[in-house]
Image (cartoon, rainbow, N blue to C red):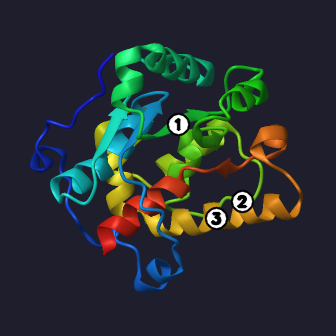
């Protein structure tokens, strides 16, 4: 299992370093940069893959840092992603080659039913968790989400902000969301949600069922944005 490498030219992806992928000076000054260096992201599906690809293409081409995203064989649910990552590092060559990489798992909380146990089993990784869906994070690019939201409502409201119906796992729709929405707005709202849950004493390792809406995707994306914005 080899990591997916970025070989498609940025011009073909419609990717560019624009105001939509830069943090405002105010937010940049508030952001604690972690100097993440090399990372591997194991994704649940194409929705996540295309989103992270967008930023990785900018970062790699501009030579900010080296990112490698492992996604090709992790098509499934949260448990599938965790199992894939574990098998990947059971391989001695992979384990040695990526020993100094930060390791991330990106998955939704709609499946499997025992999602809490999956999260607990994945504690050795950095988790980019969205409840219910990665589209919860995408919707935050356009509006605040303050109360529990269903999958159907998430898709309906996301579609209302786009030129036509939202298609899950569409590279074009992902690009449209990033370019026409506000990544910084999404970061701010996700940060506020995390603070609200923390004040209630809730964590993803014990209370994910009570944390809808929720996403921690912003924690990595904000680091991407900070690197690009310097």
Q: Of callouts 1 and 2, which one flags the residue occurring earlier in the amino acid sequence?
A: 1
Residue identifier under label 3: 191
Q: Of callouts 3 and 1, which one flags the residue occurring earlier in the amino acid sequence?
A: 1
Give left or right: position of 9 versus 80: left
Does residue 67 appear in the picture of this structure?
yes
- Residue 99 appears at what percent x and percent y? 42, 34
What's the CA distance linking mark 1 and mark 2? Answer: 17 Å
Q: Quadrant of the N terminus?
A: top left
Residue identifier under label 1: 106
**Total numbered circles:** 3
- Residue 195 appears at what percent x and percent y? 75, 65
Image point (32%, 60%), residue name: 179
Between 92 and 155, the one nearer to me in the picture:
92
What element does badge 3 sit on?
Answer: helix
Does residue 167 appear in the picture of this structure?
no
Image point (50%, 50%), residue name: 138
- Residue 160 appears at what percent x and percent y? 49, 52
Q: What mark, if any, has residue 194 been given in the picture?
A: 2
Give the crowd class for mark 3: few <14, some 14-19, many >=20 residues within 10 Å.
Answer: some
For the residues bearing labels 3 and 2, Cβ distance under 8 angstroms: yes
Q: What mark, if any, has residue 120 been given in the picture?
A: none
What's the CA distance linking mark 3 and mark 1? Answer: 17 Å
Give left or right: position of 3 versus 34: left
What's the CA distance linking mark 3 and mark 2? Answer: 5 Å
Give left or right: position of 210 versus 132: right
For the residues bearing labels 3 and 1, Cβ distance under 8 angstroms: no
- Residue 173 appears at what percent x and percent y? 35, 44
What element does badge 2 sit on?
Answer: helix
């Amino acid at each position: 299992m080899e990591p997916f490498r970025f070989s498609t030219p940025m011009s073909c992806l419609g990717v560019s370093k624009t105001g939509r992928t830069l943090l405002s000076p105010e937010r940049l000054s508030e952001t604690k940069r972690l100097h993440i260096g090399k990372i591997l992201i194991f994704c649940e599906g194409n929705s996540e893959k295309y989103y992270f690809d967008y930023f990785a293409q900018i970062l790699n081409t501009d030579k900010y840092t080296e990112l490698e995203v492992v996604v090709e064989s992790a098509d499934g649910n949260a448990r599938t992603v965790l199992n894939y990552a574990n098998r990947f590092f059971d391989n001695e060559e992979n384990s040695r080659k990526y020993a100094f990489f930060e390791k991330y798992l990106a998955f939704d909380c709609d499946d499997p039913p025992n999602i809490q146990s999956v999260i607990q089993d994945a504690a050795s990784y950095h988790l980019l968790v969205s409840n219910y869906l990665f589209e919860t994070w995408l919707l935050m690019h356009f509006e605040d989400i303050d109360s529990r939201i269903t999958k159907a409502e998430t898709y309906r409201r996301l579609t209302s902000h786009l030129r036509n119906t939202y298609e899950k796992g569409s590279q074009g729709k992902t690009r449209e969301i990033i370019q026409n929405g506000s990544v910084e707005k999404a970061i701010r709202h996700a940060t506020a949600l995390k603070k609200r849950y923390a004040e209630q004493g809730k964590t993803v390792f014990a209370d994910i069922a009570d944390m809808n809406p929720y996403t921690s995707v912003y924690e990595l994306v904000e680091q991407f944005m900070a690197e690009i914005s310097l």
